[in-house]
Amino acid sequence: MRALWLVFLLPLLLVCGSAAVDQSSSVKKKSDKPDDKTAVKAKKAEDTPAVKRDLFEAVMDDHSLVKVELLQEQVQVATPYGMLKVPASDVRRIDFMSRPVPDAPKKIAAAIEKLKSDIFAEREAGNKELVELGPASYHAVVEATHAEDLEVKQRAKAVLQKLEKKFSAEELRRKPHDVIATPTFTIAGHIQGSIIKVKTVYFGEVQLKLGDIRTLSSTGSTRGATLALDASRYAAPGGTTWLETGVAVRSGSRLVITATGEIDMYPLGGYNGQYRATPSGPKWGGTYAVPSPGTIVGRVGTSGKEFTIGEKYEGTPGEAGVLYLRIVPSPWSNASSGEYKVAIRGQ
Protein backbone atom coordinates (compact mmCIF):
# COMPACT_ATOMS: atom_id res chain seq x y z
CA MET A 1 0.00 0.00 0.00
CA ARG A 2 2.87 2.38 0.92
CA ALA A 3 4.61 1.54 -2.32
CA LEU A 4 1.43 2.37 -4.21
CA TRP A 5 1.25 5.85 -2.55
CA LEU A 6 4.88 6.51 -3.46
CA VAL A 7 4.13 5.67 -7.07
CA PHE A 8 1.43 8.39 -7.14
CA LEU A 9 3.33 11.00 -5.03
CA LEU A 10 6.71 10.82 -6.78
CA PRO A 11 5.59 12.42 -10.09
CA LEU A 12 3.76 15.16 -8.17
CA LEU A 13 6.87 16.03 -6.11
CA LEU A 14 9.00 16.16 -9.25
CA VAL A 15 6.58 18.58 -10.95
CA CYS A 16 6.38 20.90 -7.90
CA GLY A 17 10.15 20.91 -7.45
CA SER A 18 10.69 21.80 -11.09
CA ALA A 19 8.19 24.67 -10.86
CA ALA A 20 9.91 26.02 -7.74
CA VAL A 21 13.29 25.94 -9.43
CA ASP A 22 11.91 27.73 -12.50
CA GLN A 23 10.28 30.41 -10.34
CA SER A 24 13.49 30.95 -8.36
CA SER A 25 15.47 31.21 -11.57
CA SER A 26 12.94 33.66 -12.99
CA VAL A 27 13.10 35.86 -9.88
CA LYS A 28 16.88 35.81 -10.00
CA LYS A 29 16.91 36.79 -13.67
CA LYS A 30 14.41 39.59 -13.02
CA SER A 31 16.48 40.97 -10.16
CA ASP A 32 19.64 40.88 -12.29
CA LYS A 33 17.99 42.84 -15.12
CA PRO A 34 18.16 46.65 -14.73
CA ASP A 35 14.93 48.64 -14.53
CA ASP A 36 13.84 49.50 -18.08
CA LYS A 37 12.51 52.99 -17.16
CA THR A 38 15.71 53.92 -15.31
CA ALA A 39 17.81 52.81 -18.26
CA VAL A 40 15.73 54.86 -20.69
CA LYS A 41 16.02 57.97 -18.51
CA ALA A 42 19.79 57.52 -18.21
CA LYS A 43 20.07 57.07 -21.98
CA LYS A 44 18.02 60.23 -22.62
CA ALA A 45 20.17 62.21 -20.18
CA GLU A 46 23.30 61.07 -22.04
CA ASP A 47 21.83 61.85 -25.47
CA THR A 48 20.35 65.28 -24.55
CA PRO A 49 22.88 68.00 -25.37
CA ALA A 50 23.48 70.78 -22.86
CA VAL A 51 21.63 74.01 -23.62
CA LYS A 52 24.01 76.25 -25.56
CA ARG A 53 23.66 79.90 -24.58
CA ASP A 54 25.19 82.94 -26.21
CA LEU A 55 28.17 84.49 -24.50
CA PHE A 56 27.94 88.21 -23.68
CA GLU A 57 30.37 90.86 -22.58
CA ALA A 58 28.97 93.00 -19.78
CA VAL A 59 30.51 96.43 -19.26
CA MET A 60 29.88 97.35 -15.65
CA ASP A 61 29.31 100.81 -14.20
CA ASP A 62 32.99 101.06 -13.21
CA HIS A 63 33.93 100.18 -16.84
CA SER A 64 35.18 96.70 -15.89
CA LEU A 65 34.41 93.87 -18.33
CA VAL A 66 32.77 90.56 -17.38
CA LYS A 67 31.95 87.66 -19.71
CA VAL A 68 28.59 86.09 -18.90
CA GLU A 69 25.90 83.75 -20.18
CA LEU A 70 22.37 85.15 -20.14
CA LEU A 71 20.28 82.63 -18.21
CA GLN A 72 16.78 84.08 -18.47
CA GLU A 73 14.71 83.07 -21.48
CA GLN A 74 13.44 86.56 -22.32
CA VAL A 75 13.83 90.25 -21.59
CA GLN A 76 10.59 92.10 -20.84
CA VAL A 77 10.52 95.70 -22.06
CA ALA A 78 7.86 98.36 -21.48
CA THR A 79 7.57 100.62 -24.55
CA PRO A 80 5.20 103.46 -25.51
CA TYR A 81 3.45 100.90 -27.73
CA GLY A 82 3.00 98.19 -25.15
CA MET A 83 4.93 95.47 -23.37
CA LEU A 84 7.38 93.40 -25.45
CA LYS A 85 8.96 90.08 -24.53
CA VAL A 86 12.25 89.75 -26.39
CA PRO A 87 13.69 86.20 -26.56
CA ALA A 88 17.17 86.17 -25.04
CA SER A 89 18.42 84.37 -28.17
CA ASP A 90 17.51 87.47 -30.23
CA VAL A 91 19.36 89.95 -28.04
CA ARG A 92 22.48 91.32 -29.73
CA ARG A 93 23.15 94.28 -27.48
CA ILE A 94 21.56 96.19 -24.60
CA ASP A 95 22.49 99.75 -23.64
CA PHE A 96 21.18 100.27 -20.11
CA MET A 97 19.85 103.58 -18.88
CA SER A 98 21.29 105.00 -15.68
CA ARG A 99 19.55 103.53 -12.60
CA PRO A 100 20.94 105.19 -9.47
CA VAL A 101 17.96 103.88 -7.48
CA PRO A 102 15.07 101.47 -8.16
CA ASP A 103 12.16 103.06 -10.06
CA ALA A 104 14.35 106.00 -11.06
CA PRO A 105 11.94 107.21 -13.85
CA LYS A 106 9.08 107.50 -11.34
CA LYS A 107 11.26 109.34 -8.83
CA ILE A 108 12.48 111.74 -11.54
CA ALA A 109 8.92 112.52 -12.65
CA ALA A 110 7.90 113.13 -9.03
CA ALA A 111 10.86 115.47 -8.47
CA ILE A 112 10.01 117.45 -11.63
CA GLU A 113 6.45 117.84 -10.35
CA LYS A 114 7.78 119.26 -7.08
CA LEU A 115 9.38 122.11 -9.03
CA LYS A 116 5.84 123.24 -9.89
CA SER A 117 4.68 123.24 -6.27
CA ASP A 118 3.34 126.37 -4.58
CA ILE A 119 5.25 125.36 -1.44
CA PHE A 120 8.83 126.62 -1.33
CA ALA A 121 10.12 123.66 0.70
CA GLU A 122 8.79 121.20 -1.89
CA ARG A 123 10.42 123.11 -4.75
CA GLU A 124 13.72 123.03 -2.87
CA ALA A 125 13.31 119.30 -2.26
CA GLY A 126 12.68 118.75 -5.98
CA ASN A 127 15.94 120.53 -6.83
CA LYS A 128 17.90 118.44 -4.35
CA GLU A 129 16.38 115.14 -5.49
CA LEU A 130 17.13 115.79 -9.17
CA VAL A 131 20.77 116.52 -8.42
CA GLU A 132 21.03 113.40 -6.24
CA LEU A 133 19.54 111.27 -9.03
CA GLY A 134 22.48 112.35 -11.18
CA PRO A 135 22.75 111.56 -14.91
CA ALA A 136 19.46 109.65 -14.79
CA SER A 137 17.60 112.95 -14.39
CA TYR A 138 19.58 114.88 -17.03
CA HIS A 139 17.22 114.51 -20.01
CA ALA A 140 14.13 115.33 -17.94
CA VAL A 141 15.86 118.40 -16.51
CA VAL A 142 16.89 119.58 -20.01
CA GLU A 143 13.25 119.28 -21.09
CA ALA A 144 12.13 121.20 -17.99
CA THR A 145 14.38 124.13 -18.99
CA HIS A 146 11.88 124.78 -21.81
CA ALA A 147 8.85 124.84 -19.51
CA GLU A 148 6.40 127.72 -19.75
CA ASP A 149 6.42 128.17 -15.97
CA LEU A 150 9.24 130.64 -15.25
CA GLU A 151 9.93 129.20 -11.78
CA VAL A 152 10.28 125.66 -13.18
CA LYS A 153 12.51 126.91 -16.01
CA GLN A 154 14.86 128.76 -13.68
CA ARG A 155 15.10 125.90 -11.19
CA ALA A 156 15.72 123.37 -13.99
CA LYS A 157 18.55 125.54 -15.36
CA ALA A 158 20.10 125.68 -11.88
CA VAL A 159 19.91 121.87 -11.56
CA LEU A 160 21.35 121.48 -15.07
CA GLN A 161 24.39 123.58 -14.18
CA LYS A 162 25.04 121.44 -11.10
CA LEU A 163 24.73 118.21 -13.09
CA GLU A 164 27.08 119.44 -15.84
CA LYS A 165 29.61 120.50 -13.22
CA LYS A 166 29.40 117.24 -11.26
CA PHE A 167 29.27 114.66 -14.09
CA SER A 168 31.14 114.12 -17.36
CA ALA A 169 29.50 114.70 -20.75
CA GLU A 170 29.74 110.94 -21.41
CA GLU A 171 27.71 110.18 -18.29
CA LEU A 172 25.08 112.78 -19.12
CA ARG A 173 24.70 111.52 -22.73
CA ARG A 174 23.37 108.15 -21.62
CA LYS A 175 19.89 107.55 -22.94
CA PRO A 176 16.87 108.05 -20.65
CA HIS A 177 15.70 104.58 -21.66
CA ASP A 178 17.13 101.12 -22.34
CA VAL A 179 18.02 100.29 -25.96
CA ILE A 180 17.83 96.63 -27.06
CA ALA A 181 19.30 95.71 -30.45
CA THR A 182 17.96 92.59 -32.21
CA PRO A 183 18.71 91.15 -35.67
CA THR A 184 15.62 92.86 -37.13
CA PHE A 185 15.10 96.14 -35.25
CA THR A 186 16.07 98.21 -32.22
CA ILE A 187 13.74 98.64 -29.23
CA ALA A 188 13.70 101.62 -26.88
CA GLY A 189 11.91 101.29 -23.55
CA HIS A 190 12.34 100.34 -19.91
CA ILE A 191 13.48 96.82 -19.04
CA GLN A 192 11.24 95.45 -16.31
CA GLY A 193 12.62 94.25 -13.01
CA SER A 194 15.77 95.26 -11.17
CA ILE A 195 18.10 92.33 -11.89
CA ILE A 196 19.27 90.14 -14.75
CA LYS A 197 20.24 86.49 -14.28
CA VAL A 198 23.63 85.44 -15.68
CA LYS A 199 26.30 82.80 -15.27
CA THR A 200 30.01 83.55 -15.02
CA VAL A 201 33.00 81.23 -15.29
CA TYR A 202 34.36 82.06 -11.84
CA PHE A 203 31.28 82.83 -9.77
CA GLY A 204 28.63 80.58 -11.32
CA GLU A 205 25.03 81.80 -11.41
CA VAL A 206 24.61 85.35 -10.14
CA GLN A 207 22.10 88.20 -10.31
CA LEU A 208 23.40 91.49 -11.67
CA LYS A 209 21.59 94.70 -10.77
CA LEU A 210 20.50 96.58 -13.88
CA GLY A 211 21.85 99.78 -12.34
CA ASP A 212 25.35 98.24 -12.22
CA ILE A 213 25.53 97.47 -15.97
CA ARG A 214 26.27 99.88 -18.79
CA THR A 215 26.12 97.55 -21.80
CA LEU A 216 25.60 93.88 -22.61
CA SER A 217 26.96 92.80 -26.00
CA SER A 218 26.75 89.37 -27.61
CA THR A 219 30.20 88.12 -28.57
CA GLY A 220 28.53 86.44 -31.54
CA SER A 221 26.92 89.64 -32.80
CA THR A 222 27.82 91.02 -36.19
CA ARG A 223 31.25 92.64 -36.29
CA GLY A 224 31.49 93.07 -40.04
CA ALA A 225 29.27 93.76 -43.04
CA THR A 226 29.19 94.83 -46.68
CA LEU A 227 26.33 97.12 -47.58
CA ALA A 228 25.01 99.79 -49.93
CA LEU A 229 24.67 103.39 -48.73
CA ASP A 230 21.84 104.91 -50.76
CA ALA A 231 22.38 108.62 -51.44
CA SER A 232 18.69 109.33 -52.06
CA ARG A 233 18.00 108.42 -48.44
CA TYR A 234 21.20 108.88 -46.46
CA ALA A 235 22.31 112.12 -48.17
CA ALA A 236 18.89 113.70 -47.75
CA PRO A 237 18.74 117.46 -47.04
CA GLY A 238 19.25 118.17 -43.37
CA GLY A 239 21.63 115.26 -42.84
CA THR A 240 19.58 113.65 -40.08
CA THR A 241 18.92 110.21 -41.58
CA TRP A 242 21.38 107.54 -40.50
CA LEU A 243 21.84 103.95 -41.67
CA GLU A 244 21.98 101.49 -38.78
CA THR A 245 24.58 98.99 -40.02
CA GLY A 246 23.92 96.33 -37.37
CA VAL A 247 27.68 96.15 -36.73
CA ALA A 248 28.39 96.09 -32.99
CA VAL A 249 31.47 98.07 -31.97
CA ARG A 250 33.13 97.24 -28.68
CA SER A 251 34.69 99.90 -26.51
CA GLY A 252 38.31 100.29 -27.57
CA SER A 253 37.98 98.00 -30.61
CA ARG A 254 39.49 98.92 -33.98
CA LEU A 255 37.43 99.45 -37.14
CA VAL A 256 38.48 99.16 -40.77
CA ILE A 257 35.97 100.70 -43.21
CA THR A 258 36.43 101.03 -46.97
CA ALA A 259 34.01 102.69 -49.41
CA THR A 260 33.82 102.88 -53.19
CA GLY A 261 31.50 104.31 -55.85
CA GLU A 262 30.18 107.70 -56.94
CA ILE A 263 26.94 109.58 -56.38
CA ASP A 264 25.29 112.48 -58.22
CA MET A 265 24.65 115.41 -55.88
CA TYR A 266 22.68 117.53 -58.36
CA PRO A 267 20.76 115.11 -60.64
CA LEU A 268 18.44 117.83 -61.91
CA GLY A 269 17.64 119.24 -65.35
CA GLY A 270 20.62 119.33 -67.66
CA TYR A 271 23.13 119.01 -64.82
CA ASN A 272 23.01 115.21 -64.51
CA GLY A 273 26.48 113.82 -63.94
CA GLN A 274 28.17 117.23 -63.58
CA TYR A 275 28.28 117.30 -59.78
CA ARG A 276 29.48 113.89 -58.75
CA ALA A 277 31.11 112.92 -55.48
CA THR A 278 33.13 110.04 -54.05
CA PRO A 279 33.09 108.83 -50.42
CA SER A 280 35.83 111.39 -49.72
CA GLY A 281 33.95 114.39 -51.11
CA PRO A 282 33.08 116.33 -54.31
CA LYS A 283 34.88 115.81 -57.63
CA TRP A 284 33.86 119.21 -59.02
CA GLY A 285 36.11 121.26 -56.74
CA GLY A 286 35.12 124.23 -54.63
CA THR A 287 35.68 125.12 -51.01
CA TYR A 288 33.43 123.56 -48.39
CA ALA A 289 33.43 122.95 -44.68
CA VAL A 290 34.87 119.63 -43.54
CA PRO A 291 33.45 117.06 -43.92
CA SER A 292 32.49 118.21 -47.42
CA PRO A 293 29.39 117.19 -49.45
CA GLY A 294 29.33 113.53 -50.45
CA THR A 295 31.66 112.45 -47.66
CA ILE A 296 30.71 109.39 -45.60
CA VAL A 297 30.63 110.01 -41.87
CA GLY A 298 29.91 107.63 -39.01
CA ARG A 299 29.07 107.49 -35.35
CA VAL A 300 28.82 104.75 -32.72
CA GLY A 301 25.48 104.60 -30.94
CA THR A 302 22.57 106.98 -31.36
CA SER A 303 24.33 109.84 -29.60
CA GLY A 304 28.00 109.17 -30.34
CA LYS A 305 30.45 111.72 -31.69
CA GLU A 306 30.62 111.90 -35.52
CA PHE A 307 33.84 110.94 -37.27
CA THR A 308 34.87 111.16 -40.94
CA ILE A 309 35.19 107.89 -42.86
CA GLY A 310 35.77 108.91 -46.50
CA GLU A 311 37.14 106.21 -48.80
CA LYS A 312 39.02 104.47 -45.98
CA TYR A 313 38.95 104.64 -42.22
CA GLU A 314 41.19 102.75 -39.82
CA GLY A 315 40.91 103.66 -36.20
CA THR A 316 39.27 103.32 -32.80
CA PRO A 317 36.06 105.35 -32.36
CA GLY A 318 36.47 105.12 -28.58
CA GLU A 319 32.82 104.30 -27.91
CA ALA A 320 30.69 101.17 -27.74
CA GLY A 321 27.46 100.57 -29.61
CA VAL A 322 26.04 99.96 -33.06
CA LEU A 323 27.75 101.70 -36.00
CA TYR A 324 25.68 104.25 -37.96
CA LEU A 325 26.54 105.83 -41.33
CA ARG A 326 25.31 108.78 -43.40
CA ILE A 327 26.45 110.98 -46.30
CA VAL A 328 27.00 114.72 -45.99
CA PRO A 329 24.13 116.16 -48.11
CA SER A 330 24.21 118.33 -51.21
CA PRO A 331 25.19 121.99 -50.65
CA TRP A 332 22.13 122.99 -52.68
CA SER A 333 19.63 121.26 -50.36
CA ASN A 334 18.37 118.87 -53.03
CA ALA A 335 18.08 115.09 -53.14
CA SER A 336 21.03 113.08 -54.48
CA SER A 337 21.13 109.80 -56.41
CA GLY A 338 23.37 106.74 -56.60
CA GLU A 339 25.00 104.72 -53.86
CA TYR A 340 28.30 103.82 -52.25
CA LYS A 341 29.48 100.30 -51.48
CA VAL A 342 30.80 100.08 -47.92
CA ALA A 343 32.77 97.23 -46.35
CA ILE A 344 33.10 97.18 -42.55
CA ARG A 345 35.39 94.96 -40.50
CA GLY A 346 35.83 94.99 -36.75
CA GLN A 347 39.10 93.85 -35.16
Image (spheres, grey):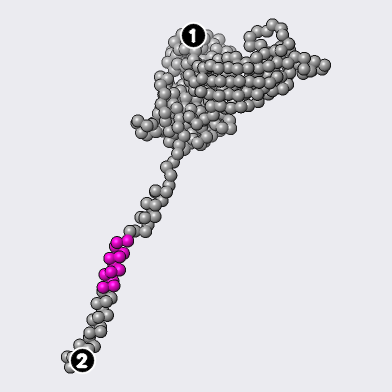
Residue 151 in the image: x percent, y percent?
53, 10
Residue 42 magenta: no
Residue in the picture at 40% in, 19% down: 62
Residue 28 magenta: yes
Secondary structure under badge 2? helix
Relative to 103, is 265 above or below? above
Q: Nearer the viewer, mark 2 or mark 1?
A: 2
Residue 328 in the image: x percent, y percent?
66, 15
* Residue type at tag 2: Leu
Residue 46 in the image: x percent, y percent?
39, 48
Asked if residue 243 lies left or right of residue 14, the reply is right
Residue pointed to by mark 1: 161
Q: Name the N-terminal-most of marks 2 and 1.
A: 2
- Magenta segment: 21-33
Residue in the picture at 49% in, 8% down: 161
Relative to 265, is 74 above or below? below
Asked if residue 235 lies left or right of residue 255, the reply is right
Which numbered circle lies on residue 4?
A: 2
Residue in the picture at 26% in, 73% down: 21
Secondary structure under badge 1? helix
Which numbered circle lies on residue 218?
A: none
